[in-house]
Image (cartoon, coloured by chain):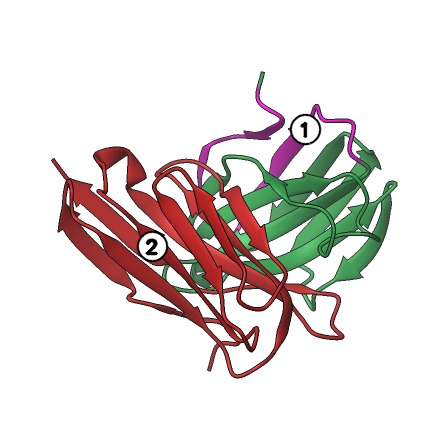
Chain colours: A red, B green
Amino acid sequence: TQLLEQSPQFLSIQEGENLTVYCNSSSVFSSLQWYRQEPGEGPVLLVTVVTGGEVKKLKRLTFQFGDARKDSSLHITAAQPGDTGLYLCAGVREYGNKLVFGAGTILRVKS
Amino acid sequence: ETGVTQTPRHLVMGMTNKKSLKCEQHLGHNAMYWYKQSAKKPLELMFVYNFKEQTENNSVPSRFSPECPNSSHLFLHLHTLQPEDSALYLCASTPNSFRAPLEEKLFFGSGTQLSVL
């Protein structure tokens, strides 16, 4: 069992649709990060959330950290083909000092 | 020029070959990392170097041998690999590993896609 479970594993949608991907754990995290990895490239950090209930927006992307700091979600509004990629969540457990990653959600946006 | 550069981008090697992966960062960072990325699995941290000193070896088999001659360069020497070692190997850097990951984000290279036949 992975410490950070991401769902769904794969998502294929049409341009213009909305979507939400999830990152869940049974452990409490001090912080959670979201990365996007485009095909043939390394992951790039999108956002870091540190406070329970925190919501951050990055253009059409909305990130939320759960109140109990055990889960996070990423919502994309009006998806575009440029949003295609692997979305990774990563976090540091409370009282921990190591960054752990989820396995990721592969998003494909078709035009 | 990109912040973290990895070469080669692709590598195919036999189980008896010896090869090396190279990583160079142009960000002035002091900490460098090797990660292994396999399909449908979380990124696995392999090694951490801080100010050229290895600070973490995550139980990596000895067929993987890292080298960090200075804060800007990191190598991963490979020998007698197994087919299950086929993966994307990512290099990353941060200003200082002692404050990461709580306070600093990872800057990744584009990776080396390794296939072991």
Letter of the chain that mark 1 sits on in the rendering: B
Instruction: State the separation of the CA atoms marked 1 and 2.
Output: 34 Å
Instruction: Say which of A14 and A107 sits in front.
Output: A14
Determine whether the residue tagged by mark 1 lies in a helix, strand or loop: strand
Identify which amino acid the numbered label 2 is placed on. His
Position of B15 with respect to A91 (left or right) is left
Q: Position of residue B44 (x, y in %)?
A: 57, 61
Can see residue B17? Answer: no
Say if B57 sits above or below B68 in the image.
below
Query: Where residue A24 appears, x then y in whole percent?
Result: 45, 74
From the viewer's side, name the closer residue of A49 and A34.
A49
Q: Secondary structure at mark 2?
A: strand
Callout 2: chain: A
Q: Is residue B34 above or below residue B39?
A: above
Give the amino acid at mark 1. Glu
Count of residue discs: 2
Q: Do the numbered discs 1 and 2 sit on residues whose CB atoms are within 8 Å?
A: no
Question: Residue placed at 57% from the left, 22% from the top?
Answer: B2
**What span is in magenta?**
B2-29
Q: Determine crowd level at label 2: few under 14, some 14-19, many 20+ residues with C-alpha closer than 10 A.
A: some
The answer to whether A45 is drawn above or below residue A53 in the figure is: above
* Residue shown at the point (62%, 63%) measured from the top left: A51
Residue holding disc 1 = B24
Identify the residue shown where x is 78% and y is 60%. B56
